Amino acid sequence: MRFVPVKTLSVLAALLIGACSSAAANGTNTSPFMATTGRTAQPIGHHEFCIRNTAECATHARSNKRVQLTAELWNMLVEINSSVNSSIRPVTDQDLFGKPEVWVYPTESGDCEDYVLLKRKILADSGWPIGALLITVVRQQSGDGHAVLTVLTDRGDLILDNLDSHITLWNGTPYRYLKRQSTVNAGEWVSIDDGRATVVGSVRK
């Protein structure tokens, strides 16, 4: 599903229904909502980020309700996703900091989790509930770990990704989902039940 501005909810609904149909055709989990299975280990990079940003990671959401996705909010997602993807140059942490994992808010350059942190911050500053903006760890088809932003909405769990210019439902992506932030505590993480047969180990992202 390509990210495109929409003026009405009917157009938005058609886009999301199309994403669900694509997932079904590919034999993937057809639910637009992820299932989680309980608390799991916090990624090391996020742990170190939280040490430097204690107040932010101690945030407890007032509610874990999903965002009611209007055409206006969809267009905001489109704009912010596009803006961050185009303004930040992809560079590995090893090249930037001489270390394999450093999670920071990027200014000019960064890797996957830095894109996620910036998108999450901009959306939160724009009024989106922090409990609906979840850093998520996935495994790519190559086997490499990767981070994306999951946005919980009443229309499904949407994925904002620096490797893809499209915003799509989680099950419309080629990734295997491992874990994400808790909806009520920004410093805690929960495992994701991807709903597929292959068992996937955790990654230290």
Image (spheres, helix red, strand yellow):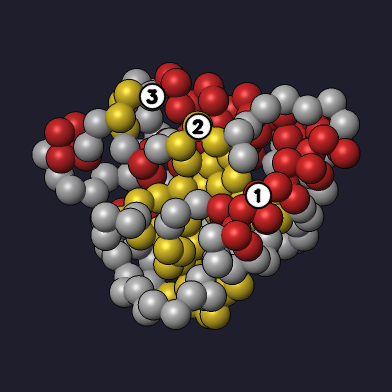
Q: Are marks 2 and 3 in contact (CB under 8 Å)?
A: no
Q: What amino acid is labelled 1 in the image?
A: Ala
**Comparing labels 1 and 3, the label whose residue is closer to the camera:** 1
Q: Nearer the N terminus, badge 1 or badge 3? A: 1
**Comparing labels 2 and 3, the label whose residue is closer to the camera:** 2
Separation of marks 2 and 3 at Cα, in angstroms: 13 Å
Return the mark for residue 100: none
For residue 184, side relative to residue 147 (left or right): right
Foreground residue among 54 and 44: 44
Q: What amino acid is labelled 3 in the image?
A: Ile
Residue plotted at (63% across, 24% down):
79
Task: Give the labeled residue for mark 1.
Answer: 19
Which quadrant would the C terminus be assigned to in this image? bottom left
Q: Quadrant of residue 174?
A: bottom left
Query: Crowding near pointer 3: few (<14 within 10 Å), some, many (20+)?
Result: some
Foreground residue among 59 and 177: 177
Task: Give the labeled residue for mark 2.
Answer: 165
Q: Evaluate whether residue 190 shows in this view.
A: no
For residue 77, side relative to residue 82 (left or right): right
Q: Nearer the N terminus, badge 2 or badge 3? A: 3
- The x, y position of residue 81, in whole percent, is 55, 31
Separation of marks 1 and 2 at Cα, in angstroms: 15 Å
Q: Quadrant of residue 145?
A: bottom left
Residue plotted at (73% across, 41% down):
15
Mark 1 lies on a secondary structure that is helix
Task: Give the labeled residue for mark 3.
Answer: 88
